[in-house]
Amino acid sequence: MLSTIYIMWRRQIKRYWRSKSRIIGSIGQPLLFLIALGFGLGPVFERAGRGNYLNFLAPGVIAQAILFMAVFNGVELIWDRQFGFLKETLVAPVSRLEIVLGRVLGGATIATFQGVIVFSLTLFLGFKPQGITFLPLAVVLMFLIALFYTTLGTAIASLMKDFHGFQLIMNFLVMPTFFLSGALFPLESAPQILKSISKINPLTYGVDGLRQVLSGTVHLGVTGDILVLSLLSLFLLLIASYLFSKIEA
Amino acid sequence: MTDTIIKAKQLTKKFNGLVAVNNISFEVKRGEVFAFLGPNGAGKTTTIRMLTTLLKPTHGKILVNGFDPLTQQDKVRKSFGIVFQDSSLDDELTAWENIEFHGILYKIGKEERRKRIKGLLQIVGLWNRRNDLVKTYSGGMRRRLEIARGLLHHPKIFFLDEPTLGLDPQTRIKIWQQIKKLNRKYQTTIFFTTHYLEEAEKMASQIAIIDQGKIVTSGTALELKKQTKKKSLEAAYLAITGKDIREENASSLEKMRMRMSRMRRK
């Protein structure tokens, strides 16, 4: 059981580690958000009496980087399908749950690592976390965000035969998830409709947890955030492995 | 040993009303080299997918090594090795990593695994290139690696779906020598498809010809030639299946694969 999960995990990590262009490329977007929004909107934010914008924004952009990487890692399943490698795993005498778990854990590890890289970048740009003792908790939260969205990507990819739907996922799932999660602006002062939408957005809980741990601004409460993300991930894992087991190749 | 290792009875597969495999029955004996021939779109690959647990039949019964692919999936999966029509290697991994991945999935212990990998990679002539990424491999090298990988867990049955497609004669001869050697050494049953009829004529101890989802005839190469009064298996094959080119509807997956191979990552 564990050997299958481990080898699936290790494969993901190796593939990631070998594509240096992917590692560098995936830093571009968060960096843009940090610089353009952080320095562009920062003064406005401060004039409105909301304090340092970078301190507010940094956890949101870390969550964004994880979200994008995680969904992409999940959707990579389609890639394996197209290049034929999926069949190698499908004919193997192992349970579909093991395959999904290995894949998801691999993808989530990479996305978490991505979060840590972006976190280091924010420090470089002037983000001042409230101390480093909370770092392990921050990594736990990053991993939970990564886990949830890798699983989501995997579940969706199990239903898709080709990449045509990928743009759809980006525009109608990933982007709204990011923009409506409170990553960029405080939700307390947002209109009721946005607040309500953000409540059913899992990323809201991730951003909230990270912000609390790293910047010290409490909104929903970190224990609740962790609980929500863990339960949702578990539930989604069951769905994903069911959908994966239905794949005919 | 002459017992039956693959048994298909009234096997049918429909895709949205289109009948890909139409009520076919056949048996493959243990240790046999069985050629499954037919024009494009005849149902060869669909049959293999059903035999290898990748596809559920619409009707019919299958036994592979005595197990039912519907209810005893893992036992069936342990019984066979397979080389698919298209590559199923991970391009971003080395040959060694690809084959080791396989060994771990099939739960072969470390010592034994390493020993077998070395032996197989030497047989297929890839030992010196084992640490190269597969994306640097030629078509023939990929095929040889897939053959080595498919045999790592010592399967009772080895499925090869057009194993020599697109390879030069030298490579084809080499690959067949290796397959034949394994068949003799381990009594591995070989189930293969090919469009190179001289390969079937030379290698197969038993041949079945499928056309438009139905098995039209079966027997040894000699029997098929006698039956049609032709001198070569190719002539016999054409007499049986006709000379018309078949219109094949590429499945969405195949279309996609064609597109992908064009825009393939460098």
Image (tube, rainbow, N blue to C red):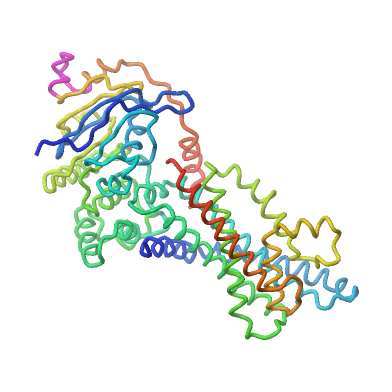
Quadrant containing the N terminus of chain A is bottom left
Query: How far from the left and from the top, in percent, is residue B150?
Result: 27, 49
Query: How far from the left and from the top, in percent, is residue A18?
Result: 47, 64
Furthest residue toward left: B1
Residue beneath the point at 69% across and 49% down: A172
Q: Quadrant of residue B161?
A: top left
Query: How far from the left and from the top, in percent, is residue B158?
Result: 24, 43
- Residue B182 vs A37, above or below: the answer is above
Tell me if A209 is positioned left or right of B242 in this view: right
Residue beneath the point at 65% across and 75% down: A121
Q: In the rendered structure, which segment of residues is drawn in magenta?
A: B222-234
Residue beneath the point at 22% across and 52% down: B124
Q: Quadrant of residue A126?
A: bottom right
Query: How far from the left and from the top, in percent, is residue A160?
Result: 54, 43
Q: How many marks?
A: 0
- Residue B240 vs A13, above or below: the answer is above
Q: Main secondary structure of the magenta part?
A: helix
Tell me if A213 is positioned left or right of A144 in this view: right
Query: Viewer-proximal residue, B175 or A246?
Result: A246
- Check if residue B227 falls in the magenta segment: yes
Quadrant containing the C terminus of chain A is top left
Query: Viewer-proximal residue, A122 or A245?
Result: A245
Query: Viewer-proximal residue, B7 or A20?
Result: B7
Residue beneath the point at 26% across and 41% down: B67
Q: Quadrant of residue B83?
A: top left
- Check if residue A82 falls in the magenta segment: no
